[in-house]
Amino acid sequence: MYRLKTGICALLVLALALVSLPAAEAATDWDGGRIRAEGTGIAPARTVSAAQARALARRAAIADAYRQLAEQIQGVDVDASTTVENMMVASDTVRTHISALVRGARIVDEKALKDGAYTVTLEVPVFGVGSLASSVFTRNETRRQWISPDSVYEPYVGDRDYDTTGYGTYDRGWDRGRTTPAAPARRSPSTSSAGSPPSGRAVGGYTGLIVDCRGLGLRPVMSPVIKAESGRPIYGYKNLDSDTVIKNGMAAYVRGESDATRAGRNPLVVRAVAVDAGANPVLSADDARRVLIENGASGFLDAANVVFIR
């Protein structure tokens, strides 16, 4: 009896641990290019035949997978303060597109289990034609020019028009209710993690950008903004071609340099000094300036060859 009670307690502890997993960690890794959900169904107790029982169990599994898929999609973070669900509430267009996306989900796996249950796995693409990205982002008709590298040292009072999707979402600066920090003092090149180019000239040849955010609690979002210490955005959706963003997203999220293939063979590597609102990497003024100077020569930001190490 003691062993039985001990086993039951262990199972309860395990169940509570699983239920308590943070949503961001428990959900499908949408940055991998797809969102998947596995549904399980069982047939009613009384069925005419085994074939009917299997068909009814399959139908129930599909319905369960659709429900889970919709919940996962609605929980995806679009930017630092907006989820897909928020956008669906605010925009009939987004809601219509995403509803159609869920209805068109592809069955990638299904199987009947020995106990009579049935499982079905549905999948929708995050990027590409007919994807979640194509529903979230609207066409960026006029790309915003990259800011002047030296402007990262200037005071920044915020930009209410910094749209992160084209549907009216925008970067809200630093934490809501806080004033934007004063611009940092210009520092010597030796304090920059990437080093400063001589006399403001680009070294050139960089294939991408890696921003090391380890230990800062960065969470993946579909429309991140890279900022300078003053809060001034230096990289965001309004700077990019819509087709590029919809096809591949704005950045890859990885756990180490070996997985940062999106940044190419010769990436510029910088270290974030902070993460704004849990989602936007913040660079020192010197590093932000260096990134903009090198992008002017190599165009890696234009190609969205950006990787964040979490």
Image (spheres, helix red, strand yellow):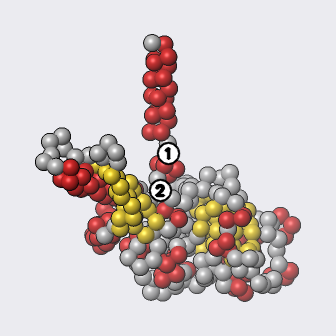
The front one of 274 and 73 is 73
The front one of 71 and 41 is 41
Q: Residues within 10 Å of mark 1 (few under 14, many from 20)?
A: few
Q: Is residue 4 above or below residue 130?
A: above
- Which mark is nearer the camera, 2 or 1? 2
Q: Is residue 122 above or below residue 288?
A: above
Helix, strand or loop status at disc 2:
loop
Image point (48%, 81%), residue name: 242
Residue 101 is situated, as x and y percent measured from the top left of the image, at 33, 69
Where, by quadrant of the figure, is residue 123 drawn? Answer: bottom left
Give the side of residue 147 with respect to residue 94, left or right: right
For badge 1, the amino acid type reads: Pro
Residue assigned mark 2: 28
Residue 158 is situated, as x and y percent measured from the top left of the image, at 55, 68
Where, by quadrant of the figure, is residue 91 drawn? Answer: bottom left
Q: Is residue 173 above or below residue 24?
A: below
Residue 74 is situated, as x and y percent measured from the top left of the image, at 37, 58
The front one of 47 and 95 is 47
Residue assigned mark 1: 22
Helix, strand or loop status at disc 1:
loop
For badge 2, the amino acid type reads: Thr
Image point (22%, 46%), residue name: 43
Instruction: Identify the image quadrant of the C terminus.
Output: bottom right
Q: Residues within 10 Å of mark 2 (few under 14, many from 20)?
A: some
Image point (60%, 63%), residue name: 253
